[in-house]
Amino acid sequence: ALVLVVSYSFVTIMFTTGIGTFLTEESMMILPQPVTNNKISSELAPVSVPATKIRIRDDLALKGNALSVWERMISSRQMDSSQRNSLAVVEVGMHRAVQCLQAARKGFQTHCIEPSPSSFEKIQQAVDREPQEIRERVRIYNIAAGSEEATVPFVASGGTGDHVGEVDMWSMKKMEKPREGTQVVQVSARPLDKVLGQIPETIYFMKVDTQGFEPHVFSGLNQMLSQHKIQYILTEFWPRGIDILQGSTDRECTGVSLVLQKLVEHGYTLYALSVEAHPKAPAYKNIPRIQSSRPFDDLFKHCQWYYEVEDQYPDPKYKMGYWTDFLALAPNVELPRSLSSLLSS
């Protein structure tokens, strides 16, 4: 089974230098390829499905969160070990090796992506400590998943907030200088269509959490999305984080067209999960009460709701906003029975 997890720290690695691939006895590592351009492209192609005509499924909107969905998807009793061995799990944006290794221990083939140099080093160490039978099911990549082959700036501290771009995510402004303990490094980005497009396994589950860089991740997945090679996709949807990395400061909800509408146009069904925020958010304790007020019959209005919460609970010191996650189902796959306990009654 192959599980794809995209997170910006990575476990099993395939190193690629130029056009060659180097395999170690302990693991496979993909090394960044040399690239000539150094940019974060904001010219991502929007899609044509009107946001006002797309309805979001709200079955998981009150009880489902990214962690609970992940654990139930990976531990589903609907498949045995032989089935898992022919499927892949992908994690895009890792920080730690925990979830990537969890999938490998369940029998899935795993592909995990993490651009942070310090996080990746720790991930590799964690993978190396595993028994050989687990290591053989793990592939980790020290790259950013992007829309094109490029070198991009990356804010690195080794923490959960590491991200592509030169924005201070706490103040939501361009970083004048790195915070103490943080540095801006250059990392290689590659489209996942090129990195994973030829793997033999069917991708059962992909998790994407890249701190607002998701439009670029999905722009590099057009081929795999059009061919429905990924059955289930769990992606963070952070309106403010996506907008700021796209260069927007006017609440444009650019993630609607660049992420959510793109998935729908490729035939995926969207399930919204519960609302998330930093514990210091002024509305944090009220989330269980207010999240049911989200509109689910219009993608744009749904996105704007997260900005409206900021207006209703103003705090000049809190700029990060509010967000959610979406579970996207490919055509002809059903919501797994393992998620039944998370369904809204």
Image (cartoon, rainbow, N blue to C red):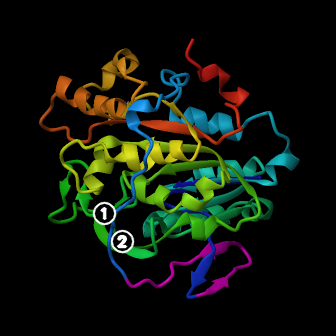
Q: CA distance from mark 2 to mark 1?
A: 7 Å
Image spot of residue 45 (x, y percent) = 39, 58
Image spot of residue 323 (x, y percent) = 36, 36
**Quarter assignment of residue 285:** top left
Q: Earlier in the sequence, mark 2 or mark 1?
A: 2
Residue 28 in the magenta stretch? The answer is: yes
Secondary structure character of the magenta stretch overall: loop
Q: Is residue 209 visible?
A: yes
Q: Secondary structure at mark 1?
A: loop
Extreme residue toward the right, this view: 82
**Quarter assignment of residue 339:** top right
Looking at the rendered structure, the kind of residue marked 2 is Val
Which portion, as a residue range, is magenta?
A: 19-36
Looking at the image, residue 78 sits to the left or right of residue 248; the answer is right
Give the residue at x 36% y 71%.
152
Give the residue at x 50% y 44%.
235
Verify CB contact (< 8 Å) between mark 2 and mark 1. yes
Q: Which residue is mark 2?
A: 152
Q: Which residue is mark 1?
A: 165
Image spot of residue 299 (x, y percent) = 39, 33
Residue 230 in the magenta stretch? The answer is: no
Extreme residue toward the left, this view: 316
Looking at the image, residue 321 sits to the left or right of residue 97; the answer is left
Instruction: Determine whether 202 is above or below 68 in the image.
Output: below
| Tag of residue 338 | none
Closest to the observer: 232 or 50?
A: 50
Give the residue at x 37% y 46%.
255
Q: Is residue 313 visible?
A: no
